[in-house]
Image (cartoon, rainbow, N blue to C red):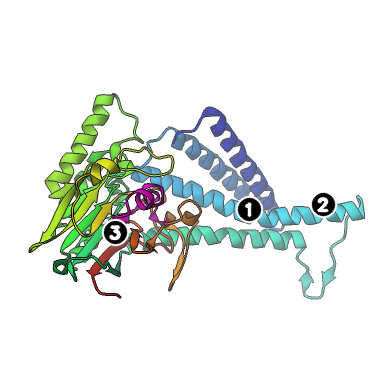
Amino acid sequence: MKFSVFSFILIILFLAWIEIYAYQATKTLLKNVKASRAKWLKRVYLLQAVVMMALVVYLRLSQTGTISFSFLISIIFMSYTAKLIGLVFVFIDDIRRAIALFFAGKKRRKEKKIAAGKKISRSEFLAKTAVAAATLPIVTMSFGIVSGAYDYRIRRRKLYLPNLPSGFNGIKMAQLSDIHSGSFFDKKAVEGGVNLLMAEKPDVVFFTGDLVNNQTKELNEYFDIFSKVKADLGVYSTLGNHDYGDYMQWTSAQAKQKNLQDMILAHEKMGWNLMMNENKSLKVGGDQISLIGVENWGAGRFAKYGDLDLAHKNSEGDVKILLSHDPSHWDAQVRPKYNDIDLMFAGHTHGMQLGVEVGNFRWSPSQWMYPQWADLYTQGNHHLYVNRGFGFLGFPGRIGILPEITIFELTNRPV
């Protein structure tokens, strides 16, 4: 994991402060424990602190996007998130004690006794509350790994396109996005997700990028599974920001270029029509609609390979559908400049793999970065659908925002 030396030193100092502060809270909890046992428990805590710091150093030297990297960063994240939440209560107690000392001077208050025994001091109470609160993120994230990572959900949407040719009325379109094959650790579960898609018998399938994390060879183990994705009108795909090998340290520019060529060839071998800044016509009988596919392009910091001018050129059809990985493309270029694009499919955000969805209520930290981060968005007669992703990246699980297979029915009749 790459940071500048200065940034990494600041991170190490911050994590060391967390460990020291948490150790002080641990000593508060152990003050009523038998001395010999408390001594060993303190040693265990110090040992885990050393291990956690060593893992942080190891991650800086590791390649991102691997399964081992995902699990290690999850362990570190869970550990320090738990400690930070717990330390909020410890900090509250420190503020309380500082105020008490300010008003009471150096005189220490004596703890009162009650008939049932010794009363728990406020400091000890808050320390125990801190431990209870700290367990919450560990339990939640562990559940997200065990239960959420492969809990595929079929989401169904009926889309009204007034100019839709009658031959396409009722057509069933499926969308996959953000597979990230290098993150998977359960091949049977992945196959189950693909089988779930194929059981829907879609007329056409769209894949909107990020087949891998870093390099094309991550797909090797899952190639046969995703080769099963077929449809009568074809499977059409685009590249996402992770598909270009930009997050890998390559031995040469030629090696990186070969990786991209291998990616293009992989789509071809799977029978997927990879669209690289181009358009194609989908035909049903005498009717047709235009399908436009661009390489990765977004309004943010990610590399911009897409050329919508080129992709859009000479596209024909009463309805035009765009496949573009990054949803920020919609506001940045698509809506302002290409008023004839009726529908755009995107992915990229994963819904941060964390959030709450209850009925029509949706919340995720992802919305702080992307105005359109999950599900359907409509402006007039123009639509954007942001898929929550089939796979996962970084954290090897999902909490609240579950992996998605989307099934669309197009209609020219008002819904």
Q: Earlier in the sequence, mark 2 or mark 3?
A: 2
| x 74%, y 56%: residue | 93
In the image, 100 versus 305, the foreground residue is: 305
Placement of the C terminus among the 4 image quadrants = bottom left
Q: Position of residue 248 (x, y in %)?
A: 34, 34
Q: Earlier in the sequence, mark 3 or mark 1?
A: 1
Does residue 91 sit above or below 199 in this rendering? Answer: above
| x 29%, y 44%: residue | 308
In the image, 307 versus 253, the foreground residue is: 307
Kindly identify which numbered label has been placed on residue 37.
1
| x 24%, y 46%: residue | 312
Placement of the N terminus among the 4 image quadrants = top left
Rounded to the nearest angstrom, the CA distance separating label 2 from label 3 is 62 Å
Within 10 Å of the Cα at label 1, are there few (<14), some (14-19), or many (20+) other Cα atoms?
few
The local secondary structure at tag 1 comes to helix
Q: Amino acid at mark 1?
A: Arg
Residue of label 3: 342
State the image quarter where residue 89 is shown: bottom right
Number of the front mark, 3 or 1: 3
